[in-house]
Amino acid sequence: MPRGCRNKWKAVSSFVNETRVLNDKLSLGAVLSIASKAESYGTPEEPFDSALYYGQNYTNLAKYVDLFRLMTYFLDYNVLPEDVGQAARWVKELTGETVFADVQTHRSKHPYTRGKYPTPDELKGVLKSCKENNIGGVAFFALYAIIEKYSDYASIIKSFRIDKP
């Protein structure tokens, strides 16, 4: 691992540790989560390796956080809808912590898909993948997009459930 990545993740982990201490002291019982980003989600190793670029060492951060929210914005980050749940499951298996997939509902910012909203079928594919991979849950990003696309997304979101064991 390049030295710069190691320094970055140590700084990020130190900050999250300090946040954990403050959280436990001031907000008894509050969940500490992080929205984490990787560049690649193709194999179990890729999310871990590519998140280091952003200073996020999942196994180290697992000591401090209660919930990972994996930013699997499939249009922005070129993750296939059917792979979103699998990527979240890999991070869950690696960290032993609860993982939610952050589901893209906003317009894409990626050069190849710029301005495109997820289609209802793409949103269904993401949610199906999350359910099949038994992840802890999902978070939709961003609220304004759900409001703008309410007629397209509402029935899909309302029908989505992850059954708890």
Image: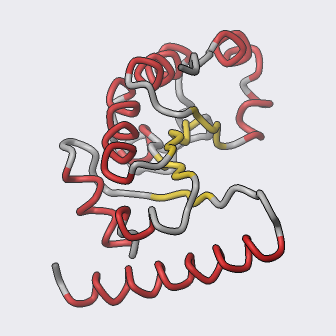
Q: Looking at this view, is 75 or 29 the one in front?
A: 29
The image quarter containing residue 130 is: top left
Against 151, is 71 above or below? below
Residue at 58% over, 34% down: 138
Q: Position of residue 155 (x, y in %)?
A: 71, 10
Whole-percent x and y of residue 139? 63, 38
Q: Could you say which is closer to the camera, residue 88 or residue 150?
A: 88
Q: Quadrant of the N terminus?
A: bottom left
- Rendered position, 122 above or below 69: above
- Position of residue 18 relative to residue 149, above or below, is below
Asked if residue 135 lies left or right of residue 31, the reply is left
Q: Quadrant of residue 10?
A: bottom left
Q: Residue placed at 51% from the left, 16% from the top?
A: 124
Nearest the camera: 48 or 83?
A: 48
Residue 109, position in %: x, y?
A: 50, 50
On screen, residue 140 versus residue 125, left or right, reads: right
Callout count: 0
Asked which colour scheme the image uses, the reply is secondary structure
x 56%, y 79%: residue: 17
Residue drawn at x 53%, y 28% is 118
